Image (cartoon, grey):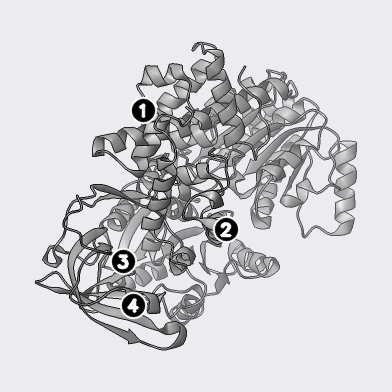
Amino acid sequence: MLTRDIKYLKGVGEARAKLLASELDIHTLADLLHYFPTRHVDRSRFYRIRDFSGTEMPYIQLRGQFINFSKEGEGRKQRLTATFTDGERLCQVTWFAKIQTIAAMYRPGVEYVLFGKPAYKYNAWQFVHPEVEAFDPARPPQGLRGIYGLTETLRKRGVTSRLIQSLVGNLLASIPKGAIAESLPAEILTERRLMPLDEALRNMHFPESVQALQRASERLKFEELFYLELHILEYARRRNTQLHGHILARVGPLFNKFYSEVVPFPLTGAQKRVLRELRADMRTGRQMNRLLQGDVGSGKTLVAFMTMLLAVDNGLQAALMAPTEILATQHAESLAKWAEPLGIRVELLTGSTRTARRRDIAEGLLDGSIHILVGTHALIEDSVQFRNLGVAVIDEQHRFGVAQRAKLWSKAEVAPHVLVMTATPIPRTLAMTVYGDLDVSVIDELPPGRKPIQTWLRFDDNRNEVYRHLNNELRQGRQAYIVYPLIQESEKSDMKSAEEGFERIKGLFPGVEVALVHGKMKPAAKDLQMQRFASGEARILVATTVIEVGVNVPNASVMIIENAERFGLSQLHQLRGRVGRGADLSYCILMSKHQLGADTRKRLGIMTETTDGFLISEADMKLRGPGDMEGTQQSGIAFNLKLANLARDGQIISVARADAIRILDGKLLLMPASIDVINRELRTRFAKEIDWGRIS
C-alpha cells in the first residue's frame, strides 16, 4: 500500500501531489510517512505575551482576540496586518499571501489560538503567517505537536505544517495498527530492545509522550545508520576481494637512496608509521585504497613521493592529481627537486600545457621514460595513457568526484594503488562512516622546528594595531594574506568585500605591491595574480576563500581574516594553514565585530586556543553538524540521513556498525526472513547507486 502515489491520499489530489513532489521529494505514501517533523513543541501550554523574552522565541501558542485588520501596500507587495491581544498586551500579525481569504476568515472579538514563532521587530512582537484556529474550550490540549520543514513556495501555496500533519494523520488512520512491515531483522530488534517500526513511525508524528518520542527517534536513527554501515562495509569488502593490485614487494635503490641521502629533513614517527602501513597494503596483491589525513605542513607530500618511488623501483609509473593548476605546479616543482638526484623524470600536465609539450609527454608516458606525472584534471583526459601506472595519488580529494577518480583507475589493466590525501582533518565518527570504504592513515605530528602559529581575535577598534603589526612584518621582508568573505560590497550586508578591501589596502600601504584574487576571475588571471604573490613580486594578497587550498608561500607570515565570524572552524583552520610554512614566527588574526552570539564566540575562541586540526574538526562538527564538512558528499557513498546526526549520534553509529560487522562476519545468525528484510531494505535505500552486492 505504501508504494501508492501520494495523489490518492485524502486531502492531496493531482496539483498538491506535484507540489509535494517538486518541493519535498514526496512521491509515495511511504515518502510522506518518512517525512519527519524537524522538531516537536508542547501544545498543551498557552503562553502570555509578557512571557516573551530576547528577540526571538521558539514556536508557541497564544490565546486571545484580534482587535483590528488593515491592508497595506499595493499589488504583489500588498500585506495584511492585524493587532492581536491576549487580554493584557498586544502583538502584531502579518500575512503576505492569500490576503483576501484570510481577511474574510477571521473577525475581531472572537477568541482564537495563534500558533507560530514570534520575533521582536520594530519595537513590537510580530507573528508572520501563524496558524490560527478558533478556540474550543471543550477540546482537550494537544500535547506534543510536530513542526514540519516547509519551503517558501509551499507556504505561498497554502501548505502549512498543520496540513502536512493532517495528511500524515489521514494516512496513519487508514493503516491498522501493527500493519506496517518491519524493516529491521527480528534478532536485532529483540537484542537491542528497539521499538517496532509501526509504533516508531506513529510516535514520530504523533508522540504519546516525550519518552515514546525519544525511543522512536533512537530506533529510526539506528535503522538509518545500520543500513548505511552495512552498505559501506559490504562495498569495502567486495572491492578488497575483487580489485587486484600490483604487488610492490621490492624496496629498491631509488627509495633507499632518497631516504638515506636526499630526504630534506628527518621523517617524523608518524610519517614512518604511515609509510609502513602503505607498504603493507601494496604487498598484498589487492588494490590499496587509502585516505591519508594530515594537518597542513605535516609532510603528506613527502610520504606520497616515497610511495611513488616504491612504484618506480618496481618498474611502474606514478601520477599525482591536484585540483588547481597552481597547486599542481608547486607539487611538480617539489617532486622534480627531490627526483633530480635520483635520475628520474617528473613532468607536469595541466590545461595550459601547449600542444607540442603534450605530444612529448604522451610519448614519454607510453615509452616509460616519464616516471611520475603531476597534473590537474588534464590527467584523466582520454588522450593521456600510461605504459604501466602503478600508484595514483590524489591531493585534496574532496575537490574531485568519484567518477573522476575512477577514470584514473581505467588508465591501467591492473588497478593502480590509490592514495587520497586531505589536509581537512575528519572526525573519527565521520571518517569511519563517510570513508568506510577507505583505510585511513593519519600523520599526527608536525616536523621538528615548526613554530606554532600565533592566533589572535581582534575587533574593528583594534584595526590600527593590526595594521601596525602587518607593516612591521612587511618591513622585515615578509608577505601577508588578507581574506574577505565577499567579492563585492552588498547593501544587504555589513561584511567587508575583497574589492573594497583591495582598494583600502593599496591606500594604506603605498609602495607595496598588492594582488587581488577571487573566484569570479578567469583562471588565467587568477593564476597570474597567484604567481605574482608566490614569486614575491606582490607582498600582500587580498583574496576570498579561493586561496584556502593550494598556495605554498613560505615567506608569508601574516593571515588576516575579515568577518571571521562568518567562517566555519574547519575553513578558518585551512586558511590559517597558508602561513607558518617557513622558519619565521607566523600570525593568524581573526577580525570580527564585537556583537557575537555565544556559539560564534566559542568557535573563534577555539581557534585562538589550539592549532590541532583534529580537535578543531571535532568541535566544528559538534557546533555545525556534518553537512558542512568539506567533501562528505564526494566519497562515493551517499548518506541522505533523515534523523541521524553524525556529529551527535556517535554511540548509535558504533552499535550499528558493530551489528553490521557481526552479520558480515557470520557471527550473528539470521533467520531466512531476516535476510530477506535486509536485502529488501538495501535494494530500496541504495537503488540509485551501483549494486555493491547483497547479504547471503
Q: Can residue 34 be seen in this snapshot? A: no
239 versus 384 height, above or below? above
Q: Name the residue under label 3.
A: 130
Mark found first going from the N terminus, 3 or 1: 3
Mark found first going from the N terminus, 4 or 3: 4
The one nearer the camera, 511 or 528, is 528
> Could you tell me the amino acid type at mark 4?
Ala
Mark found first going from the N terminus, 3 or 2: 2
Q: Nearer the viewer, mark 4 or mark 3?
A: 4
Q: Name the residue under label 1.
A: 195
> Could you tell me the amino acid type at mark 3?
Pro
Per the model, the C-alpha gap separating discs 3 and 2 is 26 Å
Per the model, the C-alpha gap separating discs 2 and 4 is 27 Å
**In the shown orientation, is residue 154 left or right of residue 258?**
left
Name the element at disc 4. Answer: helix
Mark number displayed over residue 14: 2
Identity of the residue drawn at 37% across and 25% down: 194
